[in-house]
Image (cartoon, rainbow, N blue to C red):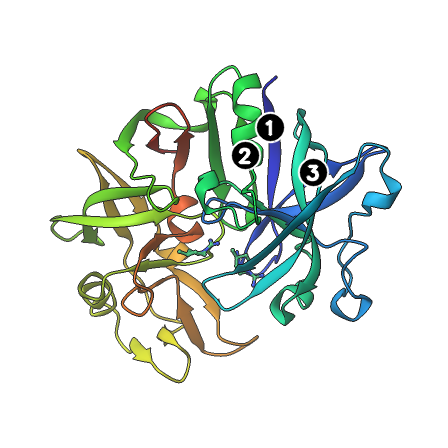
């Protein structure tokens, strides 16, 4: 059975993250979760999360679900790139996204969440769509929703059609030809250590010359911005008057009134152009004349990340066949 579900920006001012409605258990409990191709744990705020750490989030209560089963003796603990994290225990239960149901999905219930999750009331947990090798459940790692659902889908794929300040979609099991233009260019995926890792063929700043390069990075729906090698981002921000890489603000900032160039990245013989508006990411605080860039340096990260700023410029196919590949199309 195939499915389709909304990817809803959690903030109307800038695309910090997208959430998608899911139902868990019997009777169904609806939560809005952050679908994250950069991790592989499915965890939720729950009746096991201390009240002091819950601030407006919906919670999953396994004790209210007739189909919930404790996965005895199993625990999990995860730390994300931005220092946030969570930990807890594990149940299996019915899990449905856009009409696709997995009847015994490992649902990791949070017993602790870090402050950045407590402070984000719109995110009720995460659905990891990375490779299951990254799953943190101990002593036995669990499968992602996609790995569990794959065999029931017409095709072992899911697609991301994220949008700038608008609702997009995640589709499961099929490729919707109405969501893209031209051809889809498929690239090989390196599945070790477990991200959707691919190699971009280069970049161009605005209408400038294309610079062939091999940029190894991950396609990551769970990261807001795009983080690329220092030489790439310095050549981009070098075209913007007043842009500086600010220690104080933690990245490239620029005068909000600046006219930004677009950014084009190569996908095999094809390319995707990120409009300037997507890179004019947000004012550093409401009403400030200083804006934070959507393109930042990856030098402190140790990995290049094609986050939402890049993904929302494309229609992206996460092909879970053997071997997996990743497809990119304009839209
Ligand atoms: C490599 C890092 C990318 C950002 N992360 C994520 N989307 N969960 C954490 C891992
Ligand atoms: C993968 C990301 C999900 C959202 N995050 C957060 N709310 N602190 C960061 C990690």
Q: Is residue 202 left or right of residue 60?
A: left
Q: CA distance from mark 3 to mark 2?
A: 12 Å
Residue sitting farthest toward the bottom: 248
Residue 272 picture quarter: top left
Q: Earlier in the sequence, mark 3 or mark 2?
A: 3
Q: Residues within 10 Å of mark 1 (few under 14, many from 20)?
A: some
In the image, which is nearer the foreground, mark 3 or mark 1?
Answer: 3
Badges 1 and 2: C-beta atoms under 8 Å apart?
Answer: yes
Q: Which residue, given by chain and number where applicable, does mark 3 sit on?
A: 22
Q: Earlier in the sequence, mark 3 or mark 1?
A: 1
Query: Along the line of sight, which residue is nearer the eye, 325 or 61?
Result: 61
Q: Is residue 307 left or right of residue 42?
A: left
Q: Which mark, by number, is residue 214?
A: none
In the image, which is nearer the foreground, mark 3 or mark 2?
Answer: 3
Query: Residue 139 placed where, x, y %?
Result: 57, 47
Check mark 3 vs ligand 2: CB closer than 8 Å? yes or no: no
Residue drawn where x is 31% and y is 62% of the image: 260
Query: Residue 207 placed where, x, y %?
Result: 19, 51
Query: Residue 169 placed where, x, y %?
Result: 55, 35
Q: Which residue, given by chain and number where applicable, does mark 2 sit on?
A: 170
Residue drawn where x is 30% and y is 45% of the image: 273
Q: Which residue, given by chain and number where applicable, does mark 1 sit on?
A: 4
Query: Residue 210 placed where, x, y %?
Result: 13, 48
User: Label 1's element?
Assistant: strand
Query: Along the line of sight, which residue is nearer the eye, 137 or 290?
Result: 137
């Amino acid at each position: 059975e195939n499915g389709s579900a909304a990817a809803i920006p959690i903030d109307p001012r800038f695309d910090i993250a997208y959430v998608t409605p899911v139902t868990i258990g019997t009777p169904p409990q609806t939560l809005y979760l952050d679908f994250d191709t950069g991790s592989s744990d499915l965890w939720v705020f729950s009746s096991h999360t201390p009240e002091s750490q819950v601030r407006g989030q919906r919670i999953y209560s396994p004790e209210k679900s007739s189909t919930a089963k404790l996965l005895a003796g199993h625990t999990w603990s995860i730390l994300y790139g931005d220092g946030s994290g969570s930990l807890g225990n594990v149940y299996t239960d019915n899990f449905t996204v856009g009409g696709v149901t997995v009847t015994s999905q490992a649902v990791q219930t949070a017993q602790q969440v870090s402050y950045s999750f407590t402070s984000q009331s719109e995110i009720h947990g995460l659905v990891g769509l990375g490779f299951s090798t990254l799953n943190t459940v101990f002593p036995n790692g669990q499968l992602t929703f996609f790995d569990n659902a794959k065999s029931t889908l017409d095709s072992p794929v899911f697609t991301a059609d994220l949008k700038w300040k608008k609702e997009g979609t995640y589709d499961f099991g099929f490729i919707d030809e109405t969501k893209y233009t031209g051809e889809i260019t498929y690239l090989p995926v390196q599945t070790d250590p477990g991200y959707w890792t691919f190699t971009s063929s280069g970049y161009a700043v605005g209408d400038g010359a294309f610079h062939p390069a091999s940029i190894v990075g991950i396609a990551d729906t769970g990261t807001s911005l795009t983080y690329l090698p220092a030489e790439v981002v310095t050549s981009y921000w070098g075209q913007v008057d007043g842009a500086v890489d600010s220690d104080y603000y933690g990245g490239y900032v620029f005068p909000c009134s600046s006219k930004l160039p677009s950014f084009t990245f190569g996908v095999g013989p094809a390319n995707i152009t990120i409009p300037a508006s997507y890179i004019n990411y947000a004012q550093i605080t409401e009403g400030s004349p200083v804006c934070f860039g959507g393109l930042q340096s990856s030098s402190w990260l140790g990995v290049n990340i094609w986050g939402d700023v890049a993904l929302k410029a494309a229609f992206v196919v996460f092909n879970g066949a053997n071997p997996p590949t990743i497809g990119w199309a304009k839209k």
